[in-house]
Amino acid sequence: MYIYDSVSKKKVPFEPIVKGEVKMYVCGPTVYDDAHLGHARSSIAFDLLRRVLVRLGYRVTFVKNFTDIDDKIIKKMQESGKSLEEITNHYIKRYKDEMHKLGVKDADIEPKATQTVGEIISFIQDLLNKKLAYKLDDGIYFDTSKDKKYLSISGMQIEEENLQSRVCPMNQKKDLKDFALWKFSKEGEPTYSASFGDGRPGWHIECSCMIKKHIANPNAPYQIDIHGGGMDLLFPHHENEASQTRCESGQELSKHWMHNGFVTINDEKMSKSLGNSFFLKDALAKYDGEILRFYLLSTHYRANFNFSQEDLLISKKRLDKIYRLKKRAFGTKNTIVNKNFVASLMEALSDDLNISKALSVIDEMTSNINEKLDIEPKNRALKSEAMANIDFLDKVLGIGYKNPYTYFQLGLSQEQKREIEELIEKRNKAKKKKNYTLADEIRAKLTKQKIQLMDTTEGTQWEKIDE
């Protein structure tokens, strides 16, 4: 397995700290609003990585957190009059429900920042004792000058004039790069008791402490094997996480850092100020979760992703081919997957999740089996192989798991399906009575409704045609 390490900026062989085991942490959402396409992209990318590692035989412990105490959450509390728990529990549930629709599996451990406050306080106290942090009027700050490796994760070359906007106002800080570990209490805000002053955690400290609490290896140069997240988190969030952990423990936080690219919508960077922050709920209202997953998978995780309806429909046609093969083989028991297909697919995915190569392998598999079935349409061994191959795609890529007939009827209500079935039944009766004029009229009516009919030996099948 080769992965691209964001720090060394090159592909490197993946060798875990402990042979056969992988400890992986990915930054989850700040739960003050609905999930957007950026959340979906990151979740799907690291879900794929996890699936591939498991298939390669690693014992993976995957942690993804929820940031449930933060400035944006507090602002939401003040605007809505709701409690922190009401807001965060609501959006956590929404997030998980939407991820399930995308085929993203739950993490093994899903900690919340509010469940880690005791560990955060101890961590900060340790930094204060070691004189790596200092106290100001508004909170406790990390002293970045004490870390000679600061900026080694992001490789940033920071200039004073642009740092002001990237980090936070100067206040009394010793250095612009210093960041808040703890924010002292303000009226109407959630507060936790601490010996150095009541208040609440800063953002960066939360992830370091959740890693330390749940999966850190205390006896190695690195605490975990892989730390992931969106490219927008590389600086300052991941840089600050790494720095405070390095200074507190004497260890590097992660052996490897992996980041997925940005999402743009119709070539514009996703932004609420632009009005194009595409909420996932809006996308799921229009498109099936598996179709969205396949589309978001289709671009390499490190590349920036431009979301457009045209590209999504092109991507769907590729997924359609998999389901058309499944339809031809449906009802046949899957037995033994094609070993060459598995080897080729895993070789592609083991090369830093090379999805373009993986999709080419899948295209070749579907084409080859279809060509053979054209010659031998009743070959059960071929059909069985097709079903086993597609079942393997479900395990590794999270696609191809639906009943193929249901898949081609997506986007229609039960009432619409019933009306179509009634028209098909009416057409079949007309054909039996040799009333071909009426049968043709019904077909034409359904075609106008974007419904395609296929008369087979097993009866009339139908599909909804894409716009």
Image: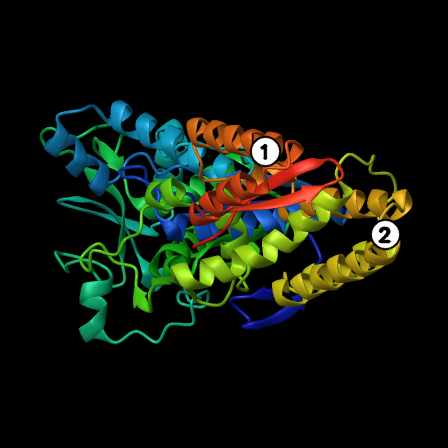
Q: Nearer the viewer, residue 42 or 177?
A: 42
Q: Nearer the viewer, residue 372 or 204?
A: 372
Of the residues tagged 1 and 2, which is closer to the observer? 1
- Amino acid type of the residue that numbered disc 2 sits on in the rendered structure: Asn
Residue 323 in the image, given as x and y percentages of width and height: 65, 47
Q: Kindly identify which residue carries mark 2.
A: 338
Q: Is residue 267 above or below residue 441?
A: below
Q: Can you see residue 349?
A: yes
Quick check: 110 left or right of 132? Answer: right
- Residue at horizontal 63 percent and vertical 39 percent from the top: 461
Q: Can you see residue 227?
A: no
Q: Nearer the viewer, residue 321 or 376?
A: 376
- Residue at horizontal 66 percent and vertical 68 percent from the top: 12
Q: Kindly identify which residue carries mark 1.
A: 430
Q: Residues within 10 Å of mark 1 (few under 14, many from 20)?
A: some
Residue 174 in the image, given as x and y percentages of width and height: 21, 61
